[in-house]
Amino acid sequence: MATITLSETTFSDTVEQSGIVLVDFWAAWCGPCRAFAPVFQAAAEEHPEIVFAKVDTEAEPALAGSLGIRSIPTLMIFRDGILVFAEPGARPAPALAKLIEAVQGLDMEAVRAEIAAREMAAEAV
């Protein structure tokens, strides 16, 4: 499956859907971003059941800023509308494959319960 391009108007609808969404924040001038691009594209082709999206931080500075993107490339992974991973840095193919496998194996009920517990603790303060 090809990657899709996200903008400020399409970002929320895309990452809030059910399933897994990987988002690569990049810029054309960024060497590590260019090195990671073929790895990201190959993973997209290997996993047609997953949405692979890209955000050009030069074209979408407000979106990148609102998400706290300070270094590129940055990879964010959402599952069922929940951010489960966000970290800067290019990854080699084996590391990206392990990350995808880990996200696929998440117990989302446990993730939701952990989020609810954190929210309750924050409200109690």
Image: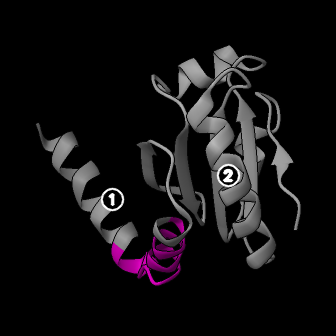
Image location of residue 110, percent across then percent down: 34, 77
22 up-or-down from 62: above or below: below
- Classify mark 2: helix, strand or loop: helix
Report the predominant secondary structure element of the magenta stretch: helix
- The segment highlighted magenta reads 96-110
Camera-side residue of 38 and 106: 38
Image location of residue 25, percent across then percent down: 63, 36
From mark 2 to mark 1, how far is it between C-alphas?
Answer: 17 Å
CA neighbours of label 2 inside 10 A, class few (<14), some (14 to 19), many (20+): many
Q: Name, please, the residue furthest toward the left.
A: 125
- In the rendered structure, which amino acid carries the disc numbered 1? Ile
Q: Quadrant of the N terminus?
A: bottom right
Which of discs 2 and 1 lies nearer the camera? The answer is 2
Q: Which residue is mark 1?
A: 115
Residue at image location 70% in from the left, 48% down from the top: 37
- The part of the image, by quadrant, that contains residue 56 is top right
- Classify mark 1: helix, strand or loop: helix
3 up-or-down from 58: above or below: below
Give residue 31's mark. Answer: none
Residue 72 lies left or right of residue 115; in this view the side is right
Q: Quadrant of the C terminus?
A: top left
- The part of the image, by quadrant, that contains residue 106 is bottom left
Residue at image location 44% in from the left, 47% down from the top: 86
Residue at image location 82% in from the left, 38% down from the top: 10
Q: Which residue is mark 2?
A: 15
Magenta stretch encompasses residue 108: yes
- In the rendered structure, which amino acid carries the disc numbered 2? Val
